[in-house]
Amino acid sequence: MQLPGWLQDRWRRWRNAKLLDPLVQRKLSGFWMTRRRAQREAAETFDLVAGFVYSQVLLACHRLGVLAQLREGPLPYSQLLSTLDLPPAAGLTLLRAAAALDLLECDESDAKESIWWLGSKGAALLGNAGALAMIEHHAVLYRDLVDPVALLRSPRGSTELARYWPYATADTPSRSAPEQIRAYTMLMAASQGLVADEILDSYDFSQHRRILDIGGGDGTFLRHVRQRAPQAQLTLFDLPAVAAEAQRRFGGVSGVECVGGDFAHDALPTGADLITLVRILHDHDDELAKSLLHRAAAALAPGGRLIVAEPLAGTPGAVRMGNAYFGLYLWAMGSGRARTVTEITAWMREAGLVDIEERATRIPLQTRLIVARRAN
Ligand SMILES: C[S@@+](CC[C@H](N)C(=O)[O-])C[C@H]1O[C@@H](n2cnc3c(N)ncnc32)[C@H](O)[C@@H]1O
């Protein structure tokens, strides 16, 4: 139930005054009715303080191959340690840290006798090539975030992450050279698998004859589409160097065309009865994101559909991902922001689209999906 604004304000003032008082905090954590909640809040607040440490434990495990070593099954401590190339005390510190984060599991009575397993989070991450690629990639982001205040004060786009994603700040992204697009194109391909499955399980692509994927990267998404809609003509549009890489990867298969261009300025291929924008809008500032929606809507065949699929702000159960994670990530990258369903829906309507609806995906944290139709 949403409280009226004035009551909400009074409640916040009262609550914050209480929580600011260490004596009240002590009472809340001691009183039987509030103890459990106080303990939970304390643990969650501690996680905010310690989050970077947890990420670095994960990075160390990934770089040292700890998770991969356990893929086939458990290992005794001495065998696992011997693969790490760390002094024994350091190795044990890392393994215990990873176990505390559910990356590993071990029934440890005596460290030297212990047997180590993948933990539930370790197994889930190891089975997700995209997540592993992002863990390594985050080293770039974290270097930019070492001084977050300096990052927020410096001109947007003067970061290492902005150099990683040159299109975010370049005046003429279509001039990006192959070596400038290689790293991000590979990262996107590695992280595309699960996103593609989410989208293809939530919307029936087989009803379409001509599909255009704008900003389609090296074509990984369209390769998944081909399996579900083998009869459709597929067109990929991306920056010239990326489209050339996609063309090379498709290797001249029939029914697929890769077109190079800049979607901010160049004409988009027309006549598709389905256009997809997968992880595209959030990379761009409002003006370009809106104009891209307008131009995509105009490029559609009458009655055709437009799909926007990407992580969104305000996602229930994953609210931190939108404005906290993507907020800072995209700030460091130099353009774009995560938007809500309401914002994207309003922009689609402004672009003249109708029948706008969100389709449920299994893991909305990975991607959400909004479908709209161009009127006949
Ligand atoms: C975040 S990646 C997403 C790639 C792919 N859709 C996916 O989900 O894996 C954004 C893509 O948009 C392309 N892109 C960015 N700016 C562009 C522009 N102005 N014109 C054409 N493509 C652009 C990039 O080259 C990149 O392939």
Image (tube, rainbow, N blue to C red):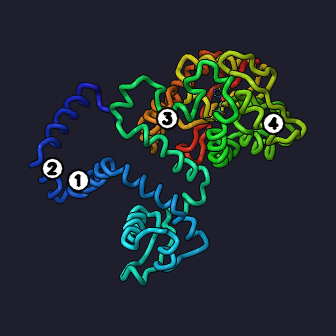
- Spatial CA distance of label 1 from label 2 is 8 Å
Task: Identify the mark nearer the N-term, 4 or 2.
Answer: 2
Is residue 311 shown left or right of residue 301?
left
Quadrant location of the C terminus in the rendered image: top right
- Is residue 53 found left or right of 32 in the rendered image? right
Tell me the CA gap for discs 1 and 3. 40 Å
Kindly indicate whether the residue at mark 2 contacts the one at mark 1 (C-beta within 8 angstroms).
Answer: yes
Element on which disc 1 rests: helix
Disc number lying in front (2 or 3): 3
Which residue is label 4 attached to? 247
Q: Earlier in the sequence, mark 4 or mark 1?
A: 1
The CA span between labels 4 and 3 is 29 Å
Quadrant in which residue 187 is drawn: top right
Q: In this view, does 176 lie above or below 132?
A: above
Q: Which of marks 4 and 1 is in front?
A: 4
The picture places residue 330, in percent across and down from the top left corner, at 49, 32
Q: In this view, does 374 lie above or below 66?
A: above
Q: Name the residue under label 2.
A: 25
| Other-residue count near label 4 (Cα within 10 Å), few / some / many at <14 / 14–19 / ≥20 | many
Nearest to N terminus: mark 2 or mark 3: 2
| Type of amino acid under label 1 | Ala
| Residue indicated by mark 1 | 38
